[in-house]
Image: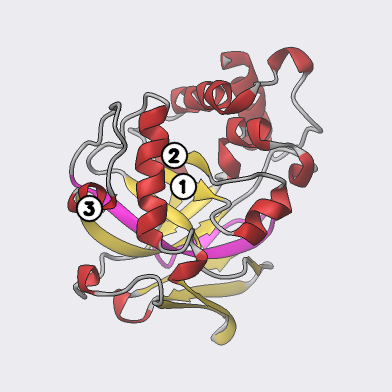
Amino acid sequence: MRAACGLLYRHWSDGSRLEKLPAELRPQGRAEAYRVQAYIEEFSAQPLFGWKIAATSIAGQRHIGVDGPLAGRLLAERVIADGGAFVLGSNLMRVAELEFAFRMGEDLVPRQTPYSQEEVLASVTSLHPAIELPDSRFAHFESAGLAQLIADNACAHYFVLGPAADQNWRALDLAVHPGQLFRNGELAEQGRGANVLGDPRIALTWLANELSRHGMTLKAGQVVTTGTCLKPLAISVSERIEGDLGVLGKVSVTIT
């Protein structure tokens, strides 16, 4: 397991690609794939920043050939300050995604019974606008398959967290809440919360239970970004990307 993660991380670090993991390192199924992914924390000098959810829309699932969402880890070293710069470099996916992100205030530990949405939301301290800048270590990530994609940290790469919303987000219907991405000040993509598993709160609850099922704790202080609420926006060098969640706030990044 450690060898598989080490190979993927080496490709992550130098921006290179592989076709697929060698047969002897390839995980079989979700559980084994998450065990491979877990070793990525050994490459970080800081506590885990949080979690991402990939493939939270039917279109996204079809694009990468999976039948449901995938969880990945957000490393603190890969978090860009709001308004900061992202070096596009060898990024293969070259997209930006606007997301609803939640910061947890309590640990949600593994248990036999699933967490309800009410329990999960009661453990949240704040909601933030966020931009994810995903990538894959596989040259053909669309056909890598579920297990290899989870092992590949669910295409996590870089992440931008905006400020906590001032608005009482708990009173809002996040399913119908709009989101917009602007490129150099011009509207480029728009969507709504329902594009995230029907509601970002449903996605957050899915993540808590996915971790629980696989013996992992969603910890206080960690951030969960719930998946793109609009079509991923193609990005290029010298662009300023701004995400706007209306009363919930804005977040931005410059592509260099």
Q: Is residue 218 left or right of residue 190?
A: left
Residue beneath label 3, please?
A: 118
Give the vertical position of 251 relative to 34 (above or below): below
Give the image quarter of residue 187. bottom right
Q: Is residue 39 left or right of residue 103?
A: right
Count of residue discs: 3
Residue 76 screen position, x and y as percent: 40, 41
Helix, strand or loop for disc 2: loop
Q: Which mark is residue 52?
A: 1
Nearer the observer, 190 or 114: 114
Residue at point 44% right, 39% down? 75
Residue beneath label 2, please?
A: 75
Mark 2 surroundings within 10 Å by alpha-carbon count, few (fewer than 14), some (14 through 19), many (20 or more): many
Residue 77 screen position, x and y as percent: 44, 41
Query: Residue type at mark 1?
Result: Lys
Residue 121 screen position, x and y as percent: 24, 54
Mark 3 surroundings within 10 Å by alpha-carbon count, few (fewer than 14), some (14 through 19), many (20 or more): few
Task: Give the residues drawn in magenta, as a range.
Answer: 82-105
